[in-house]
Structures are given as structure tokens and as C-alpha cells.
Image: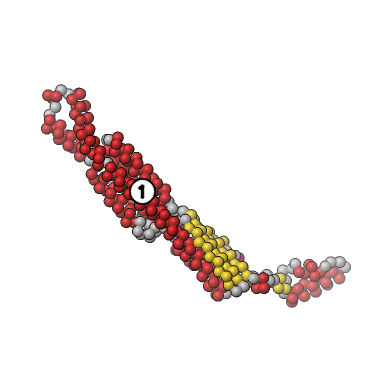
């Protein structure tokens, strides 16, 4: 069953002192174009996360957003007292030597490493929780893609059925088409030559040769087979590119029928088939 390249999935994991959220979305693209937005404390895990997501997303312009929140009690800043005392001592000595009046405590508090930010370090348990959240979001994302793919598949089946119906419609014009071509050739020949100068046997041979060249039987058979192959391919997974190749073959046969038709009614049907095929091609751009 086909899937759409358009997808969205989000999962929120509530843990003691922690809240993890991962959101993934994508649009159509020829290749995978993945952008990740993650907190700084998880930067060292970006390559690992990308390696996990890439084969799952496969194709599309995708974006993954990871947010990590810790409760205030687990994320509050603390003062590094030993470093603060050293700064205070040095600042006090400088103030006394230079006879400066200043708030040494306020200055010391702004010095490097005085405050510990409280950003939690990544441990295996935390990372496992993150990956669990990511995978649950991806499952929802895949379900979204599958649902969108079902809508596309229904439309494809309708369009192919329309092309098959139009193809059968050409049969109603076949007999009149051949008769009209024969009459036109005969009329033109008699216009330029005397009836007595026409070799009837040679005329029949040339006419048969010409009609054989504009016969549409092979093109119609191939077009029908390509349509059936397209419908079979819809049952395959990640068949977007393959379906694109099949539509090229369908288009080739439709064009050949149009060029060989020599009949205004059949050419009108060909235009309708082309219209249905173009609608398929537009939607195929969004198939995984």
C-alpha cells in the first residue's frame, strides 16, 4: 500500500521531573532532506538520532523537533561556593589596593563558573526515554502518511479506471475511422487520376499497407497492460518512483494513439486520457 510523503506525528512523554516532546513533519521532495532541532545538551546525540530517523522517513523534506523540560527543582541553578570565595578574595584585595569602592559580591556573581546552570547531563536512561518518545512520534507520523496514501490510492484507481473506460470508447470509432480513411484516399486518388489508370490490385495492396501502419491494436493492448501494471504496483510499499516510470509508459502509448488516430473523435478521447494522466502525475509527486 502506498504512502504519502506528507506526514505529521507528535508524542509527549511525561516522566518524573521531565517532559519530553518530539514532533516530526514532512513534505514532498525527491530525496530525504532532514532538519533536526534539538536542545544543546543532546547535540552529541544528533548523528545517532539522524541515523535512526533517516531509514524510517525514507524520502521527503522533513523536520524533527525535540524539546526537553525539567522541573524547577531538578533544573535550578546552584552556586559554586569555592570558586565564589576565590573571586571575592581576589576582588577584595584589588579593591583595597586600588582604594576602589565597588560591590564585589555583585561582580563576583557574574564571573565564570560561579553558577552551575543545572542543565541535566545525558545518561543512558534519559536518552532511552528520548528515543522511546521519538519512536512513538514516528509511529504516528507513519500512520498519517498511510492515511494520506489511501486517499491518493483511491484517486489513482479512479483515474486509471477512467483511462481504461476511455480506451474502450475508441473502439466505437474504429469502423467508421477505417471506412473514412479508405474513402478519403480513394476520393483523392480519383481526383488526380483517371479511373482507368488505377490498378485496383495495387491500390488494395497499398491501402492495406497504409492501414496496417495506422492500426492501433498494439498500442491499445500495451496501454491496457500498463494500466493493469500500475494498479498492481499500488499494492507495493514505497513505489512512488516505480509508479512514475509506469506513467511514462502510459503517456507514451496515449501519445502514439493520438498521432496514429487520423480521426477527430479518437483524438478527443486521447485528450481526455491525457487529462486523467496529468492528474495522476501531479499526485504522484507526493507519493513515497
Residue shown at 74%/68% (left/top)? 111
Please tell me which residue is depicted at 45% across the width and 62% down the height of the picture.
143
**Of 115 and 283, the residue lying toward us:** 283
Residue ranking furthest to the bottom: 82
Q: Quadrant of the C terminus?
A: bottom left
Identify the residue at image location x=57%, y=70%: 14
- The picture places residue 154, in percent across and down from the top left corner, at 38, 53
Give the side of residue 12 with respect to residue 261, left or right: right
Vertical order, 280 against 76 (above or below):
above
Q: Position of residue 100 (x, y in %)?
A: 86, 66
| Residue 155 versus residue 18 in the image, above or below | above
Q: Which residue is mark 1?
A: 159
Q: Quadrant of the N terminus?
A: bottom left
Between 98 and 133, the residue placed more toward the observer is 133
Identify the element where label 1 is drawn: helix
Looking at the picture, does residue 122 appear above or below residue 242?
below
* Residue nearest the observer in this picture, 208 or 136: 136
> Does residue 81 appear in the picture of this structure?
yes
Amino acid at each position: 500500500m502506498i504512502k504519502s510523503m506528507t506526514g505529521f506525528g507528535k508524542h509527549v512523554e511525561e516522566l518524573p521531573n521531565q517532559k519530553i516532546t518530539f514532533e516530526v513533519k514532512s513534505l514532498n521532495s525527491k530525496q530525504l532532506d532532514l532538519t533536526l532541532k534539538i536542545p544543546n545538551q543532546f547535540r552529541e546525540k544528533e548523528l545517532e538520532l539522524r541515523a535512526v530517523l533517516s531509514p524510517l522517513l525514507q524520502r521527503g523534506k522533513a523536520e524533527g523537533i525535540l524539546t526537553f523540560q525539567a522541573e524547577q527543582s531538578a533544573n535550578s541553578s546552584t552556586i559554586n561556593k569555592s570558586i565564589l570565595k576565590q573571586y571575592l578574595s581576589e576582588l577584595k584585595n584589588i579593591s583595597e589596593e586600588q582604594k576602589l569602592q565597588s560591590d564585589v559580591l555583585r561582580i563576583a556573581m557574574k564571573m565564570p563558573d560561579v553558577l552551575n546552570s543545572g542543565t541535566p547531563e545525558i545518561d543512558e536512561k534519559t536518552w532511552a526515554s528520548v528515543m522511546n518518545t521519538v519512536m512513538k512520534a514516528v509511529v504516528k507520523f507513519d500512520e498519517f502518511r498511510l492515511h494520506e496514501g489511501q486517499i491518493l490510492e483511491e484517486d489513482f484507481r479512479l483515474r486509471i479506471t477512467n483511462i481504461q473506460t476511455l480506451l474502450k470508447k475508441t473502439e466505437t470509432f474504429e469502423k467508421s475511422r477505417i471506412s473514412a480513411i479508405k474513402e478519403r484516399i480513394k476520393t483523392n486518388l480519383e481526383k488526380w487520376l483517371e479511373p482507368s489508370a488505377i490498378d485496383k490490385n495495387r491500390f488494395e495492396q497499398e491501402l492495406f499497407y497504409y492501414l496496417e501502419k495506422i492500426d492501433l491494436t498494439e498500442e491499445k493492448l500495451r496501454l491496457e497492460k500498463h494500466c493493469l501494471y500500475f494498479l498492481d504496483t499500488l499494492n507495493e510499499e514505497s513505489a512512488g518512483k516505480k509508479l512514475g516510470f509506469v506513467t511514462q509508459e502510459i503517456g507514451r502509448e496515449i501519445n502514439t494513439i493520438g498521432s496514429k488516430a487520423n480521426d477527430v473523435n479518437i483524438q478527443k478521447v486521447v485528450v481526455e486520457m491525457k487529462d486523467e494522466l496529468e492528474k495522476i502525475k501531479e499526485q504522484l509527486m507526493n507519493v513515497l
